[in-house]
Amino acid sequence: RINGERLWASLMELAKIGATPKGGVKRLALTDLDKQGRDLVVGWGKEAGMSITVDQIGNVFMRREGRNPALPPIMTGSHIDTQPTGGKFDGNYGVLAGLEVVRTLNDRGIETEAPVEVAFWTNEEGSRFVPVMMGSGVFCGAFSLETAYAAKDTEGKSVRDELARIGYMGEQVPGQHPIGAYFETHIEQGPVLEDADKVIGVVPAVMGLSWYDCVVTGMEAHAGPTPMGLRKDALQVSTHIMQEVVKIANRYPPYGRGTVGMVQLFPNSRNVIPGEVKFSIDLRNVNDELLNTMHEEMLAFIDKTRSDSGLAISIERVSYYPPCPFHPDCVGAVREATAKLGYSTMDVVSGAGHDAIYAARLAPAGMIFVPCKDGISHNEIEDAKSEHLEAGCNVLLHAMLERAKI
Amino acid sequence: RINGERLWASLMELAKIGATPKGGVKRLALTDLDKQGRDLVVGWGKEAGMSITVDQIGNVFMRREGRNPALPPIMTGSHIDTQPTGGKFDGNYGVLAGLEVVRTLNDRGIETEAPVEVAFWTNEEGSRFVPVMMGSGVFCGAFSLETAYAAKDTEGKSVRDELARIGYMGEQVPGQHPIGAYFETHIEQGPVLEDADKVIGVVPAVMGLSWYDCVVTGMEAHAGPTPMGLRKDALQVSTHIMQEVVKIANRYPPYGRGTVGMVQLFPNSRNVIPGEVKFSIDLRNVNDELLNTMHEEMLAFIDKTRSDSGLAISIERVSYYPPCPFHPDCVGAVREATAKLGYSTMDVVSGAGHDAIYAARLAPAGMIFVPCKDGISHNEIEDAKSEHLEAGCNVLLHAMLERAKI
Ligand SMILES: NC(=O)NCCC(=O)O
Ligand SMILES: NC(=O)NCCC(=O)O
């Protein structure tokens, strides 16, 4: 069993770097604070006797050698960058749970056949630089190193320059690092476990997602003198599409999701009929066929709305991740470890993308979820119980040992 | 008949001050550009032999004496401040049409029994300082001089300081300036005249308006892991209210108006269910009883939505102007002048507030509308035809002469 207090203490220590007044963390990727966080974790890794490798996109691999160094490592990891108003646990838990596994192996003097590695991936959040899950994406070849290097923040600073500046542009070519199996522990970021009063979520798969930008163009006009019948109100037309996004998701339970999270009006003035509305659409499902059906139904509704309203409506898909089923071996290892340890459990499909979906393209992968308070994440008030974090870490220990062999 | 070319030339000359690349004008109230515009118009007034009075809120009255100086003046006017992305005609036309009337009287050596005055009112637009229609509002006692003086722009500069700085803080106590009758020519700022192919809009009344701020509070949560049934999506609930605003207006034709022009989401992120949505509601009608019915129906719908959704919804009325019927004598004078001159005409209720609604609290008042291109105003592409502006000015001349007596 791992040391829950030590895990908690490390989480709290790391959370001091970029701590916000409301109890959260702001530690954006490749900032000075990210460097401080990386240095702290790397220091802990070295103290635990691990060797450090950094690749060209700044992914860090901390290695505890196995009896057979030729075997590909059993890896765990996550990320330590945060949202601008992020919490203490998202990502950080996955990295420090891995560190706690190694510390526990050291305490007990346990040797493994395969090496054990703890990774943290660069810029998972995508808050400062897009695309999200950048480090693991480059690692698995989803997009090129050059694409990632060229990404700029709102001030025009590039990933390449910022990586070099904080001293985390390594030598290793991304992907030239073998993985035997990959596990990731993470807070659920949703309310399902808490709602069902379960401690461990076994994650069979991650939902696929489609992101869109939709722009409805009407004609801006004065709210007073323009009769209702002569209006081209871009917001009114938009509201029908916004509602349909939710209706489509509700037609495909239990894993259909539909969200409009971002809306921008032009000119956005109290007494001007909106001339243009731009909004995001986020559709998800764990079944790719259903996700595609949702996609088609949305396009059909937009076509109908365009002809009904006479307004110009553009829709562009800006991101697409297919659903990612995890490997039966890893899912099984998590399930068995949970059973052995006697934690209450259920299967929880991950609604959010994680570095594990990219790792899964290269090696068998699996995830372990623990509850977070009220299902809230990407928020400074994000919270989790120490005993749940400890339980998830114990499951991680046993699942990794099952793969790494004692 | 007035001189249409001279009127047009003066409009184009004034439009150079604050001209924008897209052909509009940005001349915000009490800026250096406003001072330049004021100086130009006051210079023209003096050249036309008028005496100038400035009151303590910076309203300017340019007076052509009558045979009987004891009679209250027959006044016309409007404003020369503009929106940040304003046009050449909104307000400016009303002031320069008044100047053109005086120039025409001078050309023909016509004396009037009552004095004739051309006014321009401070900060009608309300873009830099709220409330809107500030100068005429203080003049008629709708709010106090101190309230207006204390208003600050986004940089913290006050009306009092800016008025003094540009040299337009006069001596006269606002309202201590008699008015015999008030006329205002204005572009329609709506599409009704153009749609009906008429040149002159006789304005029987200005609609009343109610402005509200509505805030719907749900719970922000991650768009992926949060099942549809466990969401408190503030945007989805808001869309129903947004649609109802339009439905309410459509239930009270032809003068019901309902607009949501401003929307703000928190946190406004693509993969976060909106936790809070703040939006404006603008309801108008020319009949105060109907406007009140619209108000009540909206509150009832919000109550129903609150209990149906379980979300917190606050609604606050932030402005209210009752409908303003114009005086039969002034409306009649406009109607007769239009008939005498043979212009095509129709009645057009003003959907937008104007300085005339405040002037109407002190004296008989009326307005004259002319078409503007595509009904567009508060926009750099605002446009109007020279012959329509000329026609409106001719109607103004004859309506004023009817009241001032030759
Ligand atoms: N875990 C996480 O928030 N990933 C970002 C992409 C997503 O919205 O799923
Ligand atoms: N004319 C004008 O735009 N007035 C501002 C107040 C309103 O929206 O009616």
Image (cartoon, coloured by chain):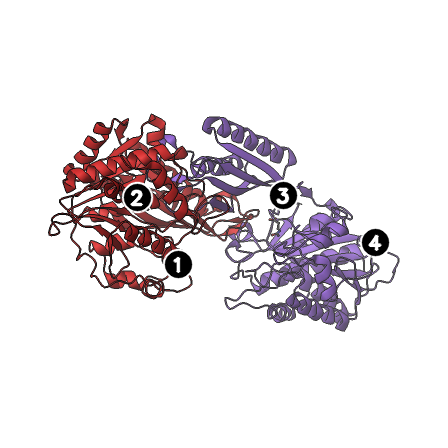
Chain colours: A purple, B red
Q: Judge left or right: residue B110 versus residue A321.
A: left
Q: Is mark 4 on a helix, strand or loop?
A: loop
**Which residue is the site of mark 3?**
A207
**Which residue is the site of mark 2?**
B94
Q: Distance between the residues labelled 3 and 2?
A: 62 Å
The subunit carrying tag 4 is A
Within-10-Å neighbours for mark 1: few <14, some 14–19, many 20+: some
The subunit carrying tag 1 is B
Q: Which residue is drawn at 53% across and 54% down?
A: A375
Q: Which of marks 1 and 2 is nearer the N terminus?
A: 1
Which tag is nearer the camera, tag 3 or tag 2? Answer: 2
Residue type at mark 3?
Answer: Met
Q: Where is residue B50 in the image (x, y as percent from the top left)?
A: 24, 52
**Image mark for residue A176:** 4
Q: Is mark 1 on a helix, strand or loop?
A: loop
Residue type at mark 1?
Answer: Thr
Q: In which quarter of the image is ligand 2?
A: top left
**Image mark for residue B31:** 1
Q: How far apart are marks 1 and 2 (CA)?
A: 20 Å
Q: Where is residue A62 in the image (x, y as percent from the top left)?
A: 77, 64
Which tag is nearer the camera, tag 2 or tag 4? Answer: 2
Which tag is nearer the camera, tag 4 or tag 3? Answer: 4
Q: Position of residue B165 (x, y in %)?
A: 36, 65
Q: Judge left or right: residue B186 versus residue A364.
A: left
Instruction: Say whether marks 1 and 4 touch (CB < 8 Å).
Output: no
Q: Where is residue B332 in the image (x, y as percent from the top left)?
A: 17, 34
